[in-house]
Image: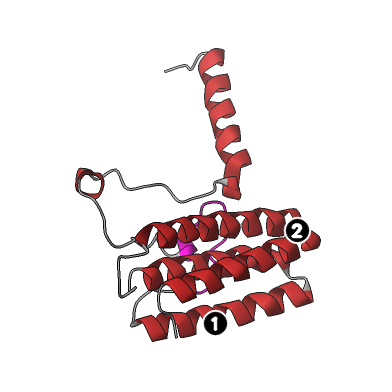
Amino acid sequence: MRMKPFAIAAVTAVLGLVWATGCSKSEPPKSASPSADSKPQMEPQAPPPAAHEPGHAEAHEAVTPTGSAPELWSQIAAEQTKLEEVIRTGRLAEVHHLAFAIRDLSVAAAGKAPSAANAATVEATLTQIKKSASALDEFGDAGNLGGVKREYASFQQELATLKSLAGGL
């Protein structure tokens, strides 16, 4: 079967677009399962582990956001220490893995919050953490150390807010 030039051009254009967007996607794709969307969720759901971010090599160890709230906050602190070292040494290609790991752990930690009284504020803070992780990814991929440093300061503030809201230790 012989492909027409228009079909070849269309396939090439689509593949080029997919390749070009790479890791600029701000969030992982949402599940298409009807059960996840049809019932209200009281507890935030963790996104897939950071190893599955589109457009990035799998040369890192993925975090698994499980454990008690104190264990999750301990993991977040450990990942923050790693991220601070990566920023300090200018290894910006590693920023996205750590930022997404912290994001995933934060979502899991928020799910362990003792009360739903401040659920809207927790959700808004999680949204900011997710946006900030994506911005860290983009600045890191662009080699923009100044942008990474500025965004990390904001990321830290949002994490501190979440920790106080979610009863972190």
Hey, which quadrant is residue 70 in on the image? bottom left
* Residue designated by label 1: 77
Q: Position of residue 37 (x, y in %)?
A: 26, 45
CA–CA distance in space, label 1 to label 2: 22 Å
What scheme was used to colour the molecule?
Answer: secondary structure
Q: Is residue 33 visible?
A: yes
Mark 1 vs 2, N-terminal side: 1
Name the residue at the front extreme.
Answer: 117
Residue at (70, 60) in percent of width and height: 140
Hey, which quadrant is residue 84 in on the image? bottom right
Residue at (65, 64) in percent of width and height: 154
Disc 2 packing (10 Å; few <14; some 14–19; many ≥20):
some
168 shown above or below 101: below
Badge 1 amino acid: Ala
Image-based side of 126 in relation to 23, left or right: left
Quarter holding the C terminus is bottom left
Image-based side of 161 in relation to 39, left or right: right
Q: Which residues are magenta?
A: 50-62
